[in-house]
Amino acid sequence: MDISIINIPKISAIYFALLQSGYDFYAVEKDDDLVQSLERFQFKHGIFDSSFFSKTKQNTCEVYPYWPRAALLETATFFIDSNSRFVNFDAYHFKVMNAGNISDEERNVTFWQWLREFPSALGKVLSNQDFQSYLVWENEWIEQQKRLLENDLLDLQKVLSTCSNRFGSPIEKVTLVLNPIKCAYSADYHITENQLLFCFGRFQKEAVIHEFLHPIVHPFIGEYKDIILQHGGNFPDIDPSYYLRGNELGRLNAFEEHLVRKLTALAVAENLPLEIGKFIKEILAN
């Protein structure tokens, strides 16, 4: 299992722009020294038009109002070329419209009208001199994180290899995209072929394991759909936003999250079940 830590300038540009647009999650659960460093790049005089990025904040997720738009902007960067133009937009549209963890309200016509402006808005940030100065600092911070997290990555590699060997996984490479501005408890993943790109604001081994398990678990949700939907109660560890509109898709989405959280805890404890299907039945029987 190949694991590396990087930053991606396009994603860095998103969060730099959000920082200029009132994004206050940069300071939540972060070290004081890091917060102070980031505040040096929080400009008050309006270095560029932030009207586009200010609309990233919505009211559909109480615990993190930048979900899902910030994550959808991250995904969109993989469909934007070096000239700040969309490429294969239909593939991006298909990906968003078929995501099981996003409600119809969050991907309605208003969202798509807003998103059309993203390549242009992103291009302006990437060419901004203040952002370029920030990126120099962020590159140095990334190198520091690589040194500090060397042992943690070895531990993570061991756990992910165990998960892959036990259950099988389409993922062969894990790329950790660290961003110092991004909320510490927000983590989003993007899968390209056999690679998992994991974007988060603070290294958390459990969060990486969690997202690594999602593509492993997801096929089982469809296979055991009927017995999952027969379960009448809600899951106490799951935020209401995971249920979407409370329809079948929402309940399956919530159960997948519940299942992955349980498996993550067992993976960290080195006590994984032998079979996911059997484990699903055990959860639903209790």
Image: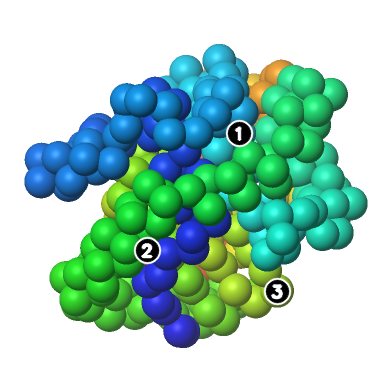
Q: Residue at x 85, y 59 (%)?
A: 88
- Provide residue 94's location: percent of width, then percent of height: 85, 48
Q: Is residue 46 left or right of residue 87?
A: left
Placement of 7 over or under 124, stated as above or below: below
At 32% from the left and 25% from the top, the residue drawn is 44
Q: Which residue occupies 45% across, 84% down?
A: 2
Residue 237 visible in this rendered orientation of the protein = no
Name the kind of residue labelled 2 in the image. Answer: Ala
Residue 242 location, x and y as percent? 58, 29
* Residue at the extreme left of the image, as rendered: 33
Residue at mark 2 = 267
User: How far apart are the alpha carbons under marks 2 and 1?
Assistant: 30 Å
**Dot 2 or dot 3, earlier in sequence:** 3
In the rendered image, residue 199, in percent from the top left (x then y), is placed at 46, 55
Give the residue number, with chain letter if any, for mark 1.
69
Splitting the image into 4 quarters, where does residue 148 fall?
bottom left
Tell me the residue that label 3 is attached to: 193
Is the C-beta separation of discs 2 and 1 under 8 Å? no
Q: Is residue 90 left or right of residue 284?
A: right
From mark 1 to mark 3, how far is it between C-alphas? 23 Å
Front label number (2 vs 3): 3
The secondary structure type at the circle numbered 2 is helix
Question: SS for tag 1?
Answer: helix
Disc 3 marks a residue whose amino acid type is: Glu
Secondary structure under the numbered disc 3 in the rendered image: loop
